Image: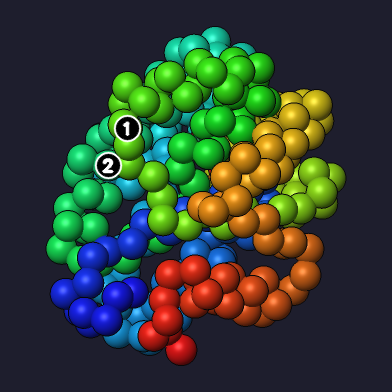
Amino acid sequence: MSADGPASPGRFITLEGGEGAGKSTQQRRLAAWLRENGLEVVETREPGGSPGAEEIRALLVTGATGRWDAVTETLLHFAARRDHLVKTVRPALERGAWVVCDRFADSTMAYQGYGQGLGRETVAAFYDLVVGDFRPDLTLVLDLPVAEGLARANARNGSAAGDENRYEKMDLGFHERLRQGFHDIVAREPGRCLLVDAAGDEDAVAAKVQAVVRERLGGRLE
Ligand code: TMP
């Protein structure tokens, strides 16, 4: 946050990671802390985050694992992303809100680029075409061994998440590749991205997230 107070520009923070890494919980906690600091915060997610993008989400997160080929799937994610950016994210940033987003384009790079084998160049080309120069101000990648994340995700599905488990059903090799993808993304863009060990308890991870946001984005955050 700049010294301009409420008139300062909005910030775009994205939370990334594999299945079961605790992004949604950390999103809620980060948003609550930013609000305590007097900021307007918009919590949103991908795929989804606008009415049109939520409709596209249903095509992506339910049904058989082989429902789409990798290019079609990537185009659907970018179609949802475009609508989300135009309808939700940009208007919020323009009025000075801080946007905390559960997943963004690094998920496409990790899941489709690495996991589904589409490759970095193709995903980057779609990004340039659809999103252009816009990038998150900060991306926190919550990192967890694959087996642990999938076990947590399965436990969650037993209770609430319903049939939104298309990616969780994909094979272990897919999940290992996408985890490696997230590691590569962080290594390539250390100024924007940071890997956060998500194996600790919820409070410890939340404290780490706050410390990073304070250090990188907000001298006045307490
Ligand atoms: P969620 O379970 O974190 O809400 O995300 C829905 C699923 O969509 C998750 O398994 C990851 C996947 N996904 C992609 O494969 N590519 C993307 O670009 C995004 C945003 C999500």
Q: Residue at x 25, y 35 (%)?
A: 83
The circle drawn on residue 24 is: none
Task: Give above or below for 49 relative to 65.
Answer: below
The circle drawn on residue 131 is: 1
Q: Residue at x 33, y 47 (%)?
A: 49
Q: Are marks 1 and 2 in contact (CB under 8 Å)?
A: yes
Which residue type carries mark 2?
Leu
Q: Residue at x 49, y 47 (%)?
A: 103
Secondary structure beneath label 2: helix
> Dividing the picture into quarters, in which one does residue 52 lie?
top left
> Dividing the picture into quarters, in which one does residue 129 lie?
top left
Image location of residue 99, percent across then percent down: 34, 60
Image location of residue 4, percent across then percent down: 21, 79
The label nearer to you, 1 versus 2, is 1
Disc nearer the start of the sequence (1/2): 2
Residue closest to the eye, 146 or 210: 210
* Disc 2 target residue: 85
Q: Is residue 153 left or right of residue 132?
A: right
Assign the N terminus to one quadrant of the image. bottom left
Q: Is residue 29 visible?
A: no
Secondary structure beneath label 1: loop
How far is mark 1 from mark 2, CA to CA? Answer: 8 Å
Image location of residue 203, percent across then percent down: 66, 79
Image location of residue 94, percent across then percent down: 17, 57
